[in-house]
Image (cartoon, rainbow, N blue to C red):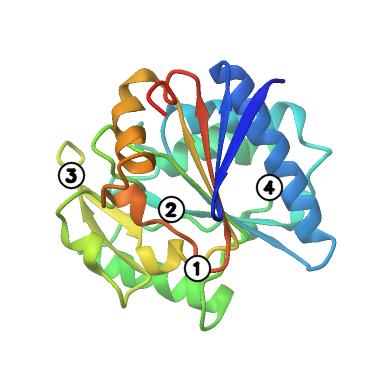
Amino acid sequence: MATSERRTGRLRVRVADSTDELIRAVAEAIAAWAAEVLSRQDSFSLALSGGNTPRALYRLLAQEYGQRVEWNRVHLFWGDERYVPHDHPASNYRMARETLIDPLGIPSQNVHPMSTDEANPDDAAARYERELRRFFGTRPRFDLVLLGMGADGHTASLFPGTPALRERTRWVTVGEAPSEPRVRLTLTLPVLNAAHAVYFVITGEDKAEAVRRVLMEQEPLPAALVQPEQGELIWWLDAAAARDV
């Protein structure tokens, strides 16, 4: 498994020759980090992302890492969610349930999806924040947050120029996407930047320009604003996404 790495301050960029090699490298890193964390504390908190690349990652974790990770000690949360029912094809929860949660038999009490059944999405955001506060206390320090990035530089459901990107008080807020389903729930930058570790996992040539703008031009796109204050930040890229860096 060939991956190259370069480091800029606390930011590390790891590039794999192919998407398959990248997914396997990320799975190995997750397993190693979970084992390290669980050697010194009772549980491992993991915030999941949606999309096609995470789908492949979750399938690999379920197929080959069932014994290497103590999944009964892993608590799953979501970085964002489309405001659709949990059985909707666009639901991030449904995707994770089908590819990761059900195949591994992760206990239901360890699974913390974002509620999408309130009439008012703001109420759902407040409800999820209460759940996070019950779990974390006064500071939401995820052990690991998985993120992707869109071609416009958005991450989670923090889209360029939207109020969600400017939220600095709430832990969870309502995001607005430029395409359907437009209404989203999302963790905010203060939560993402409090994490012990953040992994961006990005594939495909269509992301190459945004990757360049973030990593080379340091433009203030949403993804560029994720800079954990005391945590590790790794950008995992396949060769296509890393074309211009």
Q: Is residue 97 left or right of residue 171?
A: right
Label pair 2/4, CB-CB below 8 angstroms: no
Sequence-earlier tag: 4 or 3: 4
Rounded to the nearest whole Å, what is the CA distance between mark 4 and mark 1? 30 Å
Q: Nearer the viewer, residue 224 or 61?
A: 224
Residue flagged by tag 3: what amino acid is it?
A: Arg
Give the crowd class for mark 3: few <14, some 14-19, many >=20 residues within 10 Å.
Answer: few
Percent position of residue 138, x then y: 51, 83
In the rendered image, the quadrant that contains the N terminus is top right
Residue flagged by tag 4: what amino acid is it?
A: Ile
Give the crowd class for mark 1: few <14, some 14-19, many >=20 residues within 10 Å.
Answer: some
Q: Which residue is mark 4?
A: 106
Q: Secondary structure at mark 4?
A: loop
Residue 151: quarter of image: top left
Give the crowd class for mark 2: few <14, some 14-19, many >=20 residues within 10 Å.
Answer: many
Residue 111: quarter of image: bottom right
Rounded to the nearest whole Å, what is the CA distance between mark 2 and mark 4? 18 Å
Q: Which residue is mark 3?
A: 182
Sequence-earlier tag: 4 or 1: 4
Q: Which one is in front in this view, the residue at disc 4 or the one at disc 3?
A: 3
